[in-house]
Image (cartoon, grey):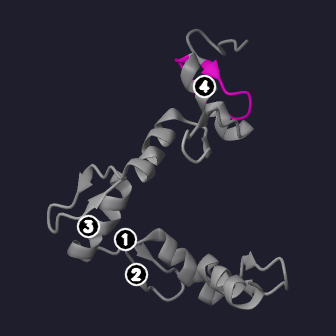
Amino acid sequence: TMRPRYQGMYDCKFCPYSSRILFNVARHERTHTGEKPFRCSVCKRAFAFRGDLRIHMRIHTGEKPFCCEVCQKAFAKKSYLVVHERVHTGEKPYQCGTCNKEFSQKSNLSCHERTHSGERPYKCEACGKAFRQSVHLRRHRKKVHE
């Protein structure tokens, strides 16, 4: 059983996180243990948090509750809408520290930064060839090994 560190506070067993609510700590600890008790009834994918399963289910139901006010395009996640809205605003909040090029998505910046570092984190298990982007590895596998 979890015991409060001091009155009314519960501590994570793995890191300094604490909360007055025991459930919050138990849920947080799944980020350390990898426990995923919530399983999709359609595709069997598992999730650590009930809310993540609920959002995932939109893939199967087609529900897209977040709508762009400019073009009416709809999205399953609020974060997808936020990124999409930058198409209309031109906002590019992510900047390369090496060449100052700006990006609307953090993932695009990360990918770009590999052009400076030379990092190729996606490696083909079949032949050992490495790629900067996962999409390039997938294309390689299809073209060369299938």
Tell me which numbered mark, 2 or 3, is placed earlier along the sequence.
3
**Which label was assigned to residue 25?**
4
Pointer 3 residue = 85
Question: Given this view, does label 4 or label 1 mark the residue nearer the observer?
Answer: 4
Tell me which numbered mark, 4 or 1, is placed earlier along the sequence.
4
**Which label was assigned to residue 118?**
none
Between residue 127 and residue 108, name the one nearer to us. Answer: 127
- Assess whether mark 1 and mark 2 are in contact (beta carbons under 8 angstroms): yes
Task: Please tell me whether mark 1 sits on a helix, a strand or a loop.
Answer: loop
Residue 18 is inside the magenta segment: yes
**Disc 1 versus disc 3: distance between alpha carbons?**
12 Å
Pointer 1 residue = 93
Above-or-below relation of 84 to 138: above
Name the amino acid, label 4: Val
Place residue 13 in its image quadrant.
top right
Tell me which numbered mark, 2 or 1, is placed earlier along the sequence.
1
Pointer 2 residue = 102
Between residue 139 and residue 5, name the one nearer to us. Answer: 139
Task: Tell me where the magenta segment starts and ends, as one range.
Answer: 10-21
